[in-house]
Amino acid sequence: MHRVTELRWDLLAVENADYHPYHSELSPHISNNIFPNWRRYKEYGGGGITDWGAHHFDIAQWGLGMDGSGPIQVIPPDGKEIQDLTYVYANGTTMSRSSKYEGIDVNGILFVGSKGKIMVNRSYYRTWPDNLISHTIRPDEIHLYKSENHYADFLDAVRARKKPICDVSIGYSSVVVCLMGNIAYELGRPLEYDQEKQIFVNDVAAIRLMGRPMRSEWHV
């Protein structure tokens, strides 16, 4: 692991973020009512996949029981057999980034099981078959952490010294999924990822894209 870390940062040392003059599109004044488009630029954000994708992949990871972990492979679309960005988990489960599945317009997260499908968004959910929505979860079945108000949940967690519905490690693992996708898109080929060591496997080019050194005035 130590050798990999040295390799990673030696490679990253050739890159650095350029200074740019102020631009309102990147950091608009609050009174201008301009959407902060910094997230669309590679130097500052990762585009839609790290913007909305972070919300949706977070729910997908939660539903798959993968909070704090994630996929071990990412495959970019090739225009042939692989039509969508696809992730593979260690247990064989696959997840794809697509707007349509077997004729269904996907606007959120679509879970596909052996007995039906459930699509969820932040404001609604829908099931196939329709009567699946009326199923009552029994006391002996899996029940997820419930939060009616994330702000209140966070404050309650601070007072009780407990973890909120989505703590920092969960947020980290969700955004790793997004970044894996962006790197696979950029390199245009499948990538293997070691979830335990948190690094791409035997792929210098992918490791090089995992980050860049901070300027001298910034430290973590």
Image: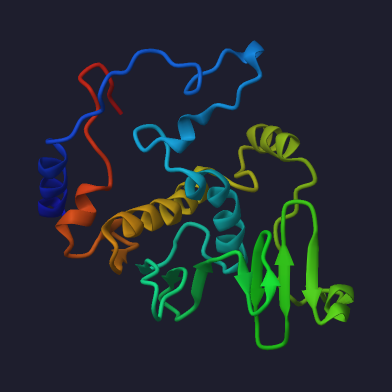
Residue located 68% across and 77% down the image: 103
Tell me if residue 185 can be seen: yes
Residue located 49% across and 53% down the image: 174
Of the 4 image quadrants, the one containing the N terminus is: bottom left
Q: Quarter-wise, where is residue 106 in the image?
A: bottom right
**Coloured how?**
rainbow
Front position in the image: 187 or 207: 187
Q: Quarter-wise, where is residue 61 in the image?
A: bottom right
Rendered position, 33 above or below 158: above
Rendered position, 209 above or below 99: above
Front position in the image: 144 or 163: 144
Which percent across, then down, holds residue 217?
25, 16
Residue located 11% across and 49% down the image: 7
Front position in the image: 170 or 141: 170
The mark total stands at 0
Tell me if residue 143 can be seen: no
Farthest bottom residue?
114
Farthest front residue?
79
